[in-house]
Amino acid sequence: MSSMTLGINFTYIISAIMFIIGLKMLSSPATARRGNLLSAAGMLLAIVVCLMNAGLDYKWILVGMAIGTVIGLIAAYKVEMTSMPEMVALFNGFGGISSLLLAWSEYHQHPELSVFLAVVTFLSAFIGGVTFSGSMIAFGKLAEKIPSKAVVFTGQHIVNALILLVAVGSGIMFAMNSADNYTLFLVVVGVSLIFGVTSVIPIGGADMPVVISLLNSYSGIAACAAGFVVNNTLLIVAGALVGASGIILTKIMCKAMNRSLSNVLFSGFGAKPQAKGAAGPQGEIRPATAEDVYYILEAADTVAIVPGYGLAVAQAQHVVCELGELLEKNGTEVMYAIHPVAGRMPGHMNVLLAEANVPYDQLVEMDDINPKMETVDVCVVIGANDVVNPAAIDDESSPIYGMPIIETHRAKTVIVLKRSMNPGFAGIQNALFFNENTRMYFGDAKVAIQALVAEFKSGD
Amino acid sequence: MEAVFLIFVFVLAIFLGFELISKVPSTLHTPLMSGSNAISGITLIGALASLKSDNVQVAVILGTLAVALATVNVVGGYAVTNRMLEMFKKKDGGAK
């Protein structure tokens, strides 16, 4: 090892340390931003040092990096906060495919691989390919470019199992003799792309937080495998960190829905309407007008706002924040109770509310608000449904039974803001709407809250 | 032996990752995800190092594509994470 390569490898250790400290700093909102910048600086350092390697093709490196930087920056600064999930999915897919391309290019240069190298080349290409096409489908579903509902057909599991079998089989044959099996490698690439599609289409829109977390993990593992291919420890360390973080997030999301990962991945939840007897809970609903809601809120001491995906769809985060500020001026304590899977990716609601200038100390987690729910005067549920459905607690036949929810039904009064009485994603009717202490306030979230804000302003 | 060493590094890093991430509050899950997503663009380093001037044409094309796409992942990922984290403010922090 020349002193130059030695120096480069030592600098990679520094980069790895910067990634680790950067991730650690992400654990508090106060230091998170600096943590991200530190991590970015670590990446920049690694890139600069890597360019000192001998014999690089700078012309094409420059072309590739210039194109990538322009696209990345434009996308990052153009994207709406409500569209963050699809943006992350898209970036994630790009990371995945670059692992595939890297493995391919290395294999093309040096087709005679040891068994170990052939195995990691296969893994890098396969996982990279699945990450890419899976992320593209997730992107399409989140951006509603393709139907976000779960797509299921009979024999789906068998088809998926067969595809996986073909992949593993080709992988083993490839590992035995990589030099004469170029076509087989192309088969692996093709199969990986198909498998990414077929494994994500049966997953419905509301399960996207799990899928994105999982794909995030895959992209890390693909980078890791690529690290084995090019014998670079920095890729292995950084890839493993991301792989682990994605797995943890996946676990948290599954727990928040009280479902196992295999249930999320294979059940096609929400694809078929729940064949439940007599359409579930029925009863009388109590509609309220903007004025009614205004009087209820005006008299309240504590108000908990419970946002859901409907808030993102209506782009209502700014008016909600305005309403919160008016309530505070009125002497009301305001908090935002956020379910871990509200929205389309983990922490989606928090980002939207932060965008609307809601200070992060007003954002309350589900486990913190539930014990003191009785003391909350009014819960305002905006565009959320399943995450506040009491059937999760008391109806054993309900498909969401056992899922932890924000127990708004225990608050003194609940105001549910909804566009119509249509049941939520899971197709389950919500008993909360028929409770005696519930008022239904119908309308588009943004318009309806604007009406409330107007009431407050004219009331002063 | 080389392979064993690399796998050793890999296993340790996985455990480190678990330790680091389980402490992140749910408020920050989206930035965590996009930030770690940017880190997964680390493939860029491998892609850069493998783009040698004596590569055959197909490898050059594949390598350049890998560099471009990994750069989108890295640059876009960090930029968008920074944009999100800028918005997280404490009450009356007045920062910015």
Image (cartoon, coloured by chain):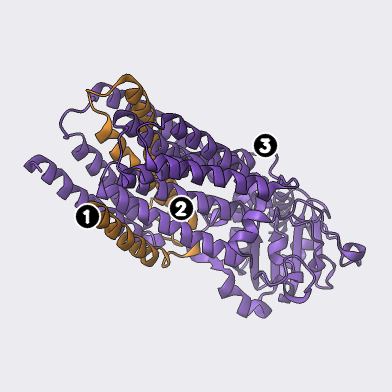
Chain colours: A purple, B orange
Residue depicted at 55% across the width and 68% down the height:
A365
Q: Can residue A83 be seen in this view?
A: no
- Which mark is drawn over residue A217? 2
Q: Dot 2, how many residues are within 10 Å of its Cα: few (below 14), some (14-19), or many (20+)?
A: many
Of A81 and A178, nearer the camera is A178
Q: Name the residue under label 1.
A: B1
Q: Quadrant of the N terminus of chain A?
A: top left
Which picture quadrant has residue A22?
bottom left
* Chain bearing mark 1: B
* Chain bearing mark 3: A
| Earlier residue among tags 2 and 3 | 3
Q: Dot 1, how many residues are within 10 Å of its Cα: few (below 14), some (14-19), or many (20+)?
A: few
Disc 1 residue type? Met
Report whether A69 appears left or right of A446.
Answer: left
Disc 3 residue type? Ile
Location of residue A159 in the rendering, given as x and y in whole percent from the top left corner: 66, 45
Q: Is mark 2 on a helix, strand or loop?
A: helix
Spatial CA distance of label 3 from label 1 is: 48 Å
Location of residue A398 in the rendering, given as x and y in whole percent from the top left corner: 78, 68
